[in-house]
Image (spheres, helix red, strand yellow):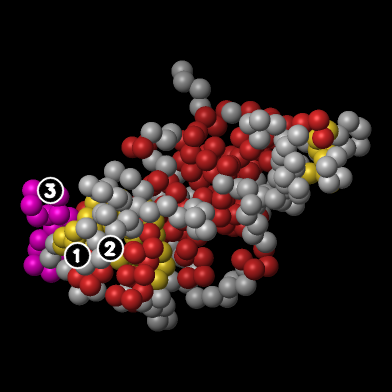
Amino acid sequence: MAKSALQNPAFHDDNAAREALEAIRWPDGPVCPHCGNLDREKIAKGQRRAHRPGLYYCAACNGQFTVTVGTVMERSKIPLSKWLLAMHLMGASKKGMSALQLQRMLGVTYKSAWFLCHRIREAMRDDASNPCSLGGQNKAVEADETYVGGKAKNRAHCKPAPKKAVLSLVEREGHVRSFHVADVTSKTVGSIIEKNVSAASALMTDESVIYPKIGAKFANHLSVNHSAGEYVRLGSYVHINTAENFYSILKRGITGVYHSVSEAHLHRYLAEFDFRYNNRIGLGVDDGERAVRIAKGIAGKRLTYRPINRDKNARSIH
């Protein structure tokens, strides 16, 4: 019988989890997060019995650190084994995993599980400071927008919050990048597309009036007319079905798993669904490697409870 991935010692033993995380973050040995020193002769491991496991000292800056310093896990009281298990579960669940489900599986409070989920989503987020362009010569990028939110007929005694717009850019056989946009206008959408898509690409869209002006700045712009019942043209080349397929996963996750998403956190949920799509089996990434990539993404990111919870009374959009 094949061994389950959930039997990994790193998901049950904190020392094994710490060693696994150190191997992922520091494949060539510890690096001081305070001064950047990576000279092994100037980094020593705590030897005293009173020292907590995994504590290091840096002689270059006289600082001390562990593998979680300078990451979304810094100062967390949740055991490392639970952190790694949560990363695996969220990475392996195609439509996501609710905080209530993680609460039950990890044996933590709902508040801890909710905060844990958002910090893992932060680890899944791309580096926005250096975005690489989607597409390129002889490549097609699909641009489409959708709206996330509840239906009025499902609210018996209150008016649903207005639906929120989401723009997704999908490179065929490649990656997706999604954005929560304030409005679907040529100016707003065009700015995002120009920043994230190579001008050498063929841009695929629907018949929306905002796209002709945007498409003129790309090597080619082709569209389908959904209002006339057209979904594929010129064989199977002109379509935005790839983007539509991505939206089907996103909406099933929000509706069936999360049920309610705050507008203030919508960008984090989009980052989560983007990450799983960009690290899918079709691109050669399995569940184990996906969890490793989440663990690599924890560095240089901090998310404290007070800022993330400022919108606790914000209206849900679904």
Give the residue at mark 2.
144
Q: Amino acid at mark 3?
A: Ser
156 in relation to 135, above or below: below
Q: Find the magenta span and give its range.
A: 226-239
Using the image, tell me which numbered label, if any, was put on residue 206: 1
**Residue 244 visible from this viewpoint:** no
Does 318 sit above or below residue 273?
below
Q: Tell me whether circle 1 and circle 2 mark residues in contact (CB < 8 Å).
A: yes
Image mark for residue 192: none
Q: Position of residue 222 (x, y in %)?
A: 16, 60
In the image, residue 143 lies in the stretch drawn in magenta: no
Asked if labels 2 and 3 touch by Cβ distance under 8 angstroms, the answer is: no
Q: CA distance from mark 3 to mark 1?
A: 15 Å
- Identify residue type, mark 1: Asp
Q: Which residue is mark 3?
A: 236
Residue at x-position 76% and y-position 34%: 39
Task: Inspect the magenta stretch and tell me whether residue 232 lies in it.
Answer: yes
Q: Magenta stretch: dominant SS?
A: loop
Judge from the rendering whether residue 241 lies leftward or rightward of residue 255; answer left or right.
left
* Dot 3 alpha-carbon crowd within 10 angstroms: few under 14, some 14 to 19, many 20 or more: few
